[in-house]
Amino acid sequence: MIDSQEMVKKVFTQKSGRIETNKGEEYYNSLFEKVKNRLSILKAQPALKDVDMMDIIESEGVNRRDFMKWVSATTATLMLPPMFAPLVAQATELMNRVPVIWIELQDCAGNSEALLRSAAPTVDDLLFDVLSLEYHETLQACAGHDADRQLEEAAHLYKGKYLLFVEGAIPMAMNGQYGTIGAMGETFHDHLIRMAKDAAAIVAVGTCATFGGVPAAAPNPTGAVGVMDIVKGKPIINIPACPANPANMVGVVLHYVLTGQIPELDSLLRPKFAFGYRIHDNCERRAHFDAGEFVEEWGDEGAKNNFCLYKVGCKGPMTFNNCSIIRYNEGTNWPIGVGRGCIGCSEPDFWDKYAYERPMADAKIKAPTGGVEKTVDEFGLGLLTATAVGIGVHAVASAIAGKKSNEGEEK
């Protein structure tokens, strides 16, 4: 009989979650030449949208110096050395060569709203003005048959070339009749399959599109599922979170513009440059966790002193995302920064498994002895043994495999 712990380690390995930040000089020199050639080809192609990226950015008060700061930060975010910065800057000006079709299914439009509601738009937000956005239900003026015609024309004209952004889950119960779209009443399922057929790649934006999200929460009456449960045989990039951060959306598009390929993904099809980090590892309150200083209840002295929020439900140790690095609201803050624990919204089934204000019952956090690495391992294996594969598996197994690997290297 196979040991359950060994089975988990085998299926969910550290290899799928590890970020290889330095692949060597030979690799980067080769990639540099490939990117240069790719951008030269794009530059020779006619622009799909008559806009000038620098004009848009400067009109919003972003000067060249600020833009180059953004370029440097984005280059690092994409895990590329500084030598790629000029190419990243060039790629932003060529984003109008890549057609994008954006469809919305079972959703609240929160990811679209995240792009639209910026008080002072960041460079990431502004780059969506440069994109050749051929179809977007929330933004377009037309409706009914006119909207259907616009979508069909875009899909036909850019067949095999467009990036398909999908926002929202897909209801499968009652033969998909919980969600229909367009003048002909096409089900969300059929709509997605048809639009995915001729896409170059599919970007599932937000937790609803990636893992089913809130619509898939128990008892899931509509039978909601994510894009990767429906579409097969196509490159899929998952960008979960409620909502997804615009910086991660732009990062995926930029990577595609630079290389013509999708970025390196983890076992849940999330780009490693954005989801290769645990919230806990880069949290500003991590020192308080290691010191055993926790908020015990809302409003206590610990809360007033920004102590660790684990005991009031923060799921940072089990969640992979770069929220703590790039943040939200023009990069000014994020949930933990305002005193609210992480609810693991970038993980599968988060609403049922993580979104409550108490710690995981079996986590056995014992800081400052042992630290989070040990206790999270204990949490994951205990949970898996009792209830089979759950939401924390990817994070847990990655930590386990990495720990064992490091121990082996030290011997």
Image (cartoon, helix red, strand yellow):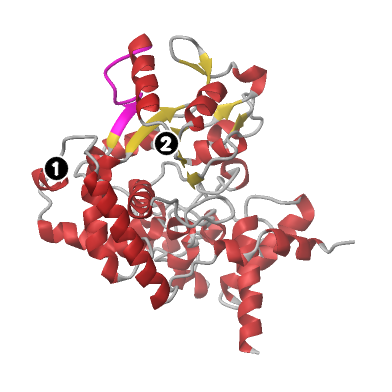
x, y percent for residue 389: 71, 51
Question: What residue occupies the far bottom of the structure in this picture?
Answer: 411
Say if residue 191 shows up in the picture.
yes
Question: What residue would you read off at disc 1?
Answer: 52
The amino acid beneath tag 2 is Phe
Closer to the camera, 25 or 300? 25
Secondary structure of the residue carrying numbered label 2: strand
Q: Is residue 16 left or right of residue 255?
A: right
Alpha carbon separation for disc pair 2 and 1: 23 Å
Question: What residue would you read off at disc 2?
Answer: 165
Secondary structure of the residue carrying numbered label 1: loop
Q: Which mark is residue 298?
A: none
x, y percent for residue 59: 9, 43
Name the residue located 63 percent from the left edge and 50 percent from the top edge: 391
Closer to the camera, 298 or 42? 42
x, y percent for residue 132: 27, 35
Q: Nearer the viewer, mark 2 or mark 1?
A: 1
Answer above or below: position of 223 versus 355.
above
Name the residue located 47 percent from the left edge and 67 percent from the top edge: 281
- Estimate how packed mark 2 is, as few (under 14), some (14 to 19) or many (20 or more) residues with alpha carbons within 10 Å: many
The span shown in magenta is 133-144
